[in-house]
Structures are given as structure tokens and as C-alpha cells.
Image (cartoon, rainbow, N blue to C red):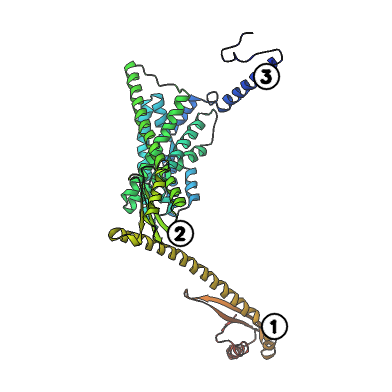
Amino acid sequence: MENSEKDKDIKITPQNADEINLQHLVLKSFKKFFIELFDIHSDSDSEATIEAVKKDIPFKGHTVWILIFSIFVASIGLNVSSSAVVIGAMLISPLMGPIVGVGLAVATNDLITLRRSLLNVIVMVILSVLTAFLYFKISPLTEETPELLARTYPTILDVLIAIFGGLGLIVAKTKSGTIASVIFGVAIATALMPPLCTVGYGLAVGNASYAGGALYLFSINAVFIALSTFIVCKILRFPLVRYADSKLLRRTSQIASLIAIAVMVPSVWLFIKLLDQQVFENKSKEFVTHQIKYDGAEVVKFTQDFELNKIDVYLIGRHVPKEKIKEWGTSLSKVEKLEETTLRIHQRDDQSGEMAEKLSSVVKAGILEDLYVKNDKLLNDKDERIRFLENEIALLKIRAVPFEQISEELKINYENVEIFSYSNKITTNFQKIDTLPVINIRWKKDVSSKEKNENLKKIESWVKFRLHLDTLQVLEY
């Protein structure tokens, strides 16, 4: 038996031949299993996918109203910082159609679909921003919320959401059969809808940096979603659009290739830059948390600047000597990705002028913030305690009333009373809460009005004396 070059060192004997064959079969089975597990070619339907994508491109009629309503819902969610409401808006969002159409058109050299997709992307953006602008313009709530601030600048996580959301979307669309469109909306609306709403917010409150940052975030996400679509369509070898004119075909292919390159190169560069920034911020935070330590001194705040490659740390308490600061700088230069980073330590006792004022303002801001948060919590706790004690006092007053004994005495002295009741009414003038004792009297039918009035005054005086009350309300029914 001849051995291959790969197996020349393996000696095959009758004793180990069956074992080698078994290993070969096992490896072959595993290979086949994993190929079938991750294969998306066999169950893809390119014609149906292209038709479905083209169907979702136009914005008109029902789609426009769905977009407007979903933008309103998302804007409300961002306005009140409710993630649940924003997610609800994502479920009905139709934002993905034109963007996926751009990626498909570039991948298949379809200039007509590309023009339609780009036009509808522009319509979608203008309509979404205008709707959000109108909402935030008329909304009485203009405060910056965490949900809004999170969409004013791009991060590596936003890019990853766009990439994997776009990949999940187009892979799901290429599968034969029908998959609920809600899945597609959830896959990418996270990356598209909130930034557009934030653009509207920035324009409504006159903050150009918020509007610009959010639009930048939307643009990044849209590019990566289109890029994901382009890559999957190329992997699945979607058929190219054929033109009768060979020159037109070549020109279309060239234009599509240029667009693909123009999208991919900046996208890759941006991804690397955002990744580097995220790594810088994470490593900076980790360094300050674990390395900047000195007995008697405390970090009140630190800032990091990726563009200027520096870390500023503000300390209060005991003075940190220059030798220790130099040691921290040496340690920082040994941290990967932070080798060229400048560490600046700001202390109150060795700073003057502008730096001293800056440090003082940082410390004051931190202290005021802590005091505000703590005092607000203490006040809320005390208010809750006061309300609880007032309710308990009201209950004790009710329990302390010898109602049965009083009602028996009343029956003996005023036989014309048919029904007698006693209660404590809790009232408030919105400044304090008070409890007002109330008695209700029902007379028998044949009692005159004169007798009622005379006896009511006597009953009121008697009950006040009997229960040691300063105030009492008497009602007749």
C-alpha cells in the first residue's frame, strides 16, 4: 500500500488499518457536519431575496405613517429615558428597507435600484428628523436624558450592533421561506431610529453638537448595515444585473466597485479608530482604578482624552510626593496601548492659578452632587416616614374612640336618632395633612326641623366633651 506524502511516517499494518480508517471516517463526518451547520448557500433564495428587498425600499402610503408613528414613540421613549418604550418603537420601525437596498444594489451592479434606494434613504432621514423635531419642539420636557446622551456620539459598540444587526438581517432575508419582518426591524432599528430622533432633539433645543454627533452615528450605522448586506450578497454570489449595452455594463460595474471601495475603506478605518479609542478608555479607567492609590489621598475625578493622548487625575486629601507621581508615570508607560500617554496629576496644595481653580471647581462639583443626591434621598425617606406615622396616628385615633359606649349613651338621651356614625376624615391643604373627626346623624321621619337643629348643637357639644375634641364636623343625612 502506498502512503501519501502527508502520511509517509505512518506505518499501516493489518492491526492498525481499521483504527486509521475509523479515524478518517470520524474526521470526515465532523467536517461534513460543520459544513452543513454553517452553510447558508443551499437554503438561500436569491431571486426571492432581491424581490423582497426591492419591495421594502419605497417610502409611501402605509410605510410613511408607520415610520412617523414609530418615530413619535421612540422620541417619547428617549424623552422620558424609557428603554422599554424605545424597544416598542423598534418593533414597528420600517427604517431598514432603503439601506439594505443600497448594499444589494452595489453588490448586484443595479444602478436603478441604487438610485431608488439612495433617494428613499434621503426621504427617510428628512421625514424622521422632521417628526422628531416637531415632537421635541412642542414637548414640555427638554431635559437631557441618559437615553438621548447615549446617541450623541458613536462608540465601538454601536458599530458592532450595526455590523451584526445588518448581517443577521440580510442572512435572515436570504433564507428560503418567510421570516417575520419584526425580526428584521429588531435587528437594526437599535442602530438607526434613536440617532435620528436625537438629531431632531438637537435641532429642537438648538444644540448643533448633539444633532451633528447623532447624525454621524446614524451615518456610521447605515454604512455598516449596507456594507454587511453587500458582503453577504457577494458571498452568496447573487446574480449581477445584465445590460444589453456592454459599455453600460462595464461602467455600472466600475461605479459599483468604486462605491464599494469608497464605503469599505473609510468604514474599516473608522472601525479601527473607534476600537482604539474604546481600548484606550478601558485601559485608562483600569489604570486609574488599580494604580492611582496613595494613603490619605482620594481620586475625585479623572478625564481621558484619546485625541491628545492624555489622562488627567484630580486628587484631594494628603499631598502625593513627586516620586510617587513619577512612579505612576513609569507604570503607565508599560501598559500596552498607553505607552505614549501623558499622565497629569492635579492636587490642591501644589497648584496655582488656573489649575487650582479648575481643581477647586471639580471638587466642589463632586461634593455638591453628592450632597444633593444624599439630601434628596434623605428628604424622600423622611417624607415617606411622616406619611406612614400620620396614617398610624389616624388609625390609633379611630381605635381609641369608645364608639359602642357613646352610641348607647346617645340612644338613651336622644331617642329620635335613627342612625349614628363616627369617622375620622383625612384632609390636606397641600401643605400639611390633618385628621378631622366627623359624626353623621339620621333622624326618624316624624322629627321636626326645629328639634333637629336644637339637638344637633347639643350632640356636637356633648361628643366634643366626651371625646376631648377641639374640632368636630356634624353632618345630617
Q: Residues within 10 Å of mark 2 (few under 14, many from 20)?
A: few
Q: Nearer the viewer, mark 3 or mark 1?
A: 3
Mark 3 or mark 1: whose residue is earlier in sequence: 3
| Residue 450 position by quadrant | bottom right
Q: Position of residue 52 (x, y in %)?
A: 47, 30
Distance (Cα) linking label 3 and label 1: 95 Å
Of callouts 1 and 2, which one flags the residue occurring earlier in the amino acid sequence?
2
Q: In the picture provided, is 302 more to the left or to the right than 46? A: left
Amino acid carrying mark 2 in the image: Asp
Identify the residue at image location x=63%, y=89%: 466
Residue furthest out toward the front: 323
Residue of label 1: 404
The residue beneath circle 2 is: 295
Vertical relation: 282 (above or below) 447:
above
Q: Are marks 3 and 1 in contact (CB under 8 Å)?
A: no
Q: Position of residue 454 (x, y in %)?
A: 58, 91
Mark 3 element type? helix
Decide if residue 472 is on the left or right side of residue 76: right
Return the mark for residue 217: none
Give neighbour class at mark 3: few <14, some 14-19, many 20+ (Cα, 10 Å). Answer: few
Alpha-carbon neighbours of circle 1 within 10 Å: few (<14), some, or many (≥20)?
few
In space, the residues marked 3 and 2 are separated at their CA atoms by 66 Å
Question: In which quadrant will I find the N terminus?
Answer: top right
- Image disc number at residue 22: 3
Residue at the image point whose x is 62% and y is 15% from the top: 10
Tally the marks.
3
Relative depth, front residue between 453 and 337: 337
* The C terminus: image quadrant: bottom right
